[in-house]
Every structure is written in structure tokens, then in C-alpha cells.
Image: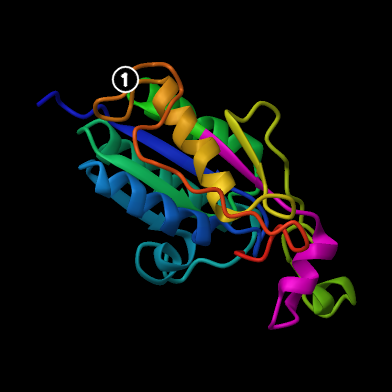
Amino acid sequence: MSKQKGFTLWMTGLSGAGKTTLTTRLVRELRNQGLAIEVLDGDEVRTNLSKGLGFSKEDRDTNIRRIGYVSRLLSRNGVGVITAAISPYRAIRDEVRRSIEVDGAVFIEVYVKCPIPVLAERDVKGLYKKALAGEIKEFTGVSDPYEEPLEPEVVVATNQETVEESAHKIIRALARRGLLRGVENTGQASMPYQRVVDLESPTAEW
């Protein structure tokens, strides 16, 4: 059996865009292939690794650097890492990319994209509406900046695609880089995929 090459799938996007949902889908597929996969979820990291940090730019940068550091350690030891955190600032994302790639692991930035009006509709807690009304400060994408990736390896539009379609895009990106066991660099995933598309409601699975 060939040794697994470490990689980091770095999910970035606004709150509610679908990062965690997509991560759950990918973990199942990749572990079914026998890959060692670890997940660094933004909310869980803040509860454990970054407890006490706020939402100033400095604290946000510290949080992302910590996620990046753990991703680096895991990836360079042959683990596939999936991160699901907003990570709003481009410079820190690029810094994390360099730190992982310099160790010989693969960094794949995935922009989980969704427009704010759709996110506000999805938001059962009403946080977007409160932020848009000025009731919440330092809310990413509204009262605090989100810097979109300039050249992400993968872009998924969760207001237009099903979870299945978005996951398949990412699987193809992994396959093209030879990161799936038993898959040549053809971009074809080895597992069967069923496209679940509701033409009347293409985002029903989110």
C-alpha cells in the first residue's frame, strides 16, 4: 500500500455558506477510501484551542494561525486535513499556505461562496439581519471585511449547487493531484457519485 500524501483542504467562506455541511460530506467519502482525515472546525477550535480569543483582527489572525499550525503538523505527517473556518483575511490564508507547502504537503483553497441575501434567508438565528441592521458589530461580511480568495483551487457556489455537486468538484481536485488512493491524475474519482439535483430547489440539501 502506498503511503498517503498529506494535504490540507482549506474551506473559506462566510458564516452559513456551507463549510461544515460540505466537510461532513467529504469526510465520509475520503474515509471510505481509507484515507486518514482530520477536521479542524472553526467553532470547535474556538472552544478548545482558541478559547478566550475575541473577534478583533488580531484575535482572528491568531486563531487562523493556530489552525494553520495544526494543519501543517498533520499534513506533513501524511494526514489529510479539512479546515472549516471563515478565515476572512487573505494575507493570513496565504501565510498558512506557504507554511504548509514549504513542508512538502499540498494546500488546496476551497472558496465556499454564497451571496449574503441567501445567507440571511438560511440564518435561523437571524444574525445576518441583526448585523445588517447594525445591531451586531464585527460581523464578517457585513460590519467586518471578508476578503475573497483571488485564485482558489476550487470555487463552490452553494446557492447554485447541491452538496453532492460541490463535494464532487473537490474530489476531482484531489484526484488531479494524485491524492486519492488508486486514482490516477485524470481528475476522475474512484467512488460512484449520484447527482441529486432538484431543479425547482437546487440548494435543498444545504
Asked if residue 77 is among those painted magenta in the image, a careful observer would answer no
| Residue extending furthest toward the bottom | 125
Q: Is residue 142 visible?
A: no
**Residue 82 in picture, x, y percent from top left:** 40, 47
Q: Please name whichever residue, 99 or 35, is drawn nearer the observer in this view of the structure.
A: 35
| Residue 97 on image: x %, y % | 48, 30
Q: Quadrant of residue 41?
A: bottom left
The amino acid sitting under disc 1 is Gly
Q: Quadrant of residue 105?
A: top left
| Left or right of 121, for residue 32 | left
Alpha-carbon neighbours of circle 1 within 10 Å: few (<14), some, or many (≥20)? some
Asked whether residue 96 appears in the rendered view, the answer is: yes
User: Where, quadrant-wise, is the N terminus in this rendering?
Assistant: top left
Residue pointed to by mark 1:
104
**Whether residue 3 is situated above or below residue 158 in the rendered picture:** above
Residue 162, relative to residue 76: is it above or below?
Answer: below
Residue 55's x, y, as percent? 62, 64
Is residue 44 toward the left or the right of residue 74 in the image?
Answer: right
Highlighted range, magenta: 109-127
Q: Residue at x 55, y 36 (%)?
A: 169
